[in-house]
Image: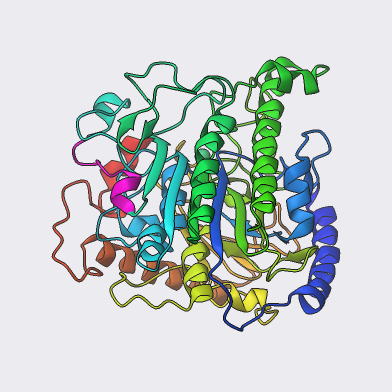
Amino acid sequence: MTAPRAGVLVGVSLIVSLWFASQLFAFDTNPAPRPNVILCMADDMGWGDPGFNGNRIIKTPNLDDMASNGLRFDRFYAGAPVCSPTRGSCLTGRHPWRYGVWSANEGHLRKPEMTLAEVLRTHGYTTGHFGKWHLGTLSSVHSGKGTRRNPQRNYLTPGMSGFDEWFATEYSVPTWNPVQDISVNPYYHNDQLAKENLEGCDSRVLMDRAIPFIRKAVSDKQPFLAVIWFHAPHEPVVAGPEFRRLYAEREEGEQHFFGAITALDLQMGRLRRELRELGVAENTMLWFTSDNGPEGDTGDKGTQRGSAGPFRGRKRSLWEGGIHVPGLLEWPAQIASGSVTQVPCSTLDYYPTTLDVLGLVPTDQPEPRDGVSLVPLFAGKMKERPVPIPFETPGGTDSKATRGSPRMALVDNRFKLLTDMEDDDEPLLFDLLVDPGESINLAQQFPDRVATMKNVLIEFRESCKLSLAGRNYSEAFAPDADDTHPASVGARIKKKK
Ligand SMILES: [Ca+2]
């Protein structure tokens, strides 16, 4: 898609979305029973992969139905262009560079960080985590990553992060027959090695554990938080025969990739049906997103078939294709069907939004938070995002790590700045409303805007360094050698290339 054509489409849908915003949002500010919260996330699903974002090949009927029954975010951002840091942003509302989760399989969710599960549990919720974890090792003496991952330093399970029940892997597994070698990267169920019901579709395997957790919560009349992080469609992408058959006319790599997404979609349909049958669908906030853009450099080989839609770049880059991901919220009690928004929103917003919905203001949470509450958006009162969304990832324009994108970015309601933050840097400024493909650099045209946005990033980076040093915690915290901000150590960046 060329940039001008995309610009026209964005313009038209902006008008439509503003109409929806004024007509269809109906947030009820009266106290209601505490909603259940389910955070669902695909792994490496591109913005252009689901049907609700225009894909006409990959079958996602359940996600499409969820989109038409709830709120579709047309500008939803993952907290980072790779797995682990985005996952940290979901659970804390804080940028992952505040606590040393620089990239995939690096760092861990520090104990003094307060997670959404910890807050909700202290307010009567039961909490469960199902699927990929990626925020720490699940054993203090073993990581399947071998010498690249210190299991003792990074030992941090969902159970240590506020989850009552958890069924999780440390990192990615095949999307079919997920446990290839139980001694390398197993599923754990509450600290115990899982040994049963691990065959076939991984999306079903993990939903087989999430659904009994939800049933029990409903039976116990307890509100619940369920975090459901699918492994699909991350590599190794394998679809079972019944899913490959749906795409029999396609190349083998496509059969697996498309089939793995349809298998995930089937489980989303199963989950939504279960919520209806249990009578809790009405007041459950059911979120769906992806942790970063699609894998691969070109998307045209093997099983790396994800689509970034009209956007430039893919996973690992701070181009839109790396961070601009599918976003949905279904919550019939508060969100009218057919709602659409183009206000930029982020996985950073889950935490502050949930606390705002419940009217919770914990006194002991680390500040600052980088996300915002979306409750005003639900109420039709948030026409623009009040603060921009900051990004930083290891690499830079000359690095393979970011596939040629600069290492920092700032997204506001209209503009996006990308910069390496070097003295001889040539910053990039794009008007995302007319140029979502990031092809026309406006930096020389708007030097004041560039300077203002760069200053926000400078302040953000300094703030992250204070967080990293433990300054946001009420308890004493001693950072170790791995807690060094990458921008402070030039050699570390070069090593990552
Ligand atoms: Ca990922």
Quadrant of the drawing holding the N terminus: top right
Q: Quadrant of residue 307?
A: top right
Quadrant of the drawing holding the C terminus: top left
Q: Residue at x 21, y 46 (%)?
A: 482
Q: Which residues are magenta?
A: 152-161
Measured from the top left, where is residue 174 in percent x and y? 52, 23
Q: Main secondary structure of the magenta part?
A: loop
Measured from the top left, where is residue 229 in percent x and y? 51, 42
- Residue 201 falls inside the magenta stretch: no
Q: Nearer the viewer, residue 52 or 118?
A: 118
Left or right: 106 in relation to 238: left
Q: Residue at x 42, y 54 (%)?
A: 127
Q: Quadrant of residue 379?
A: bottom right
Q: Is residue 352 above or below residue 271?
A: below
Q: Is residue 22 above or below residue 306?
A: below
The answer to whether any part of residue 58 appears in the image is yes
Measured from the top left, where is residue 23 in percent x and y? 82, 77
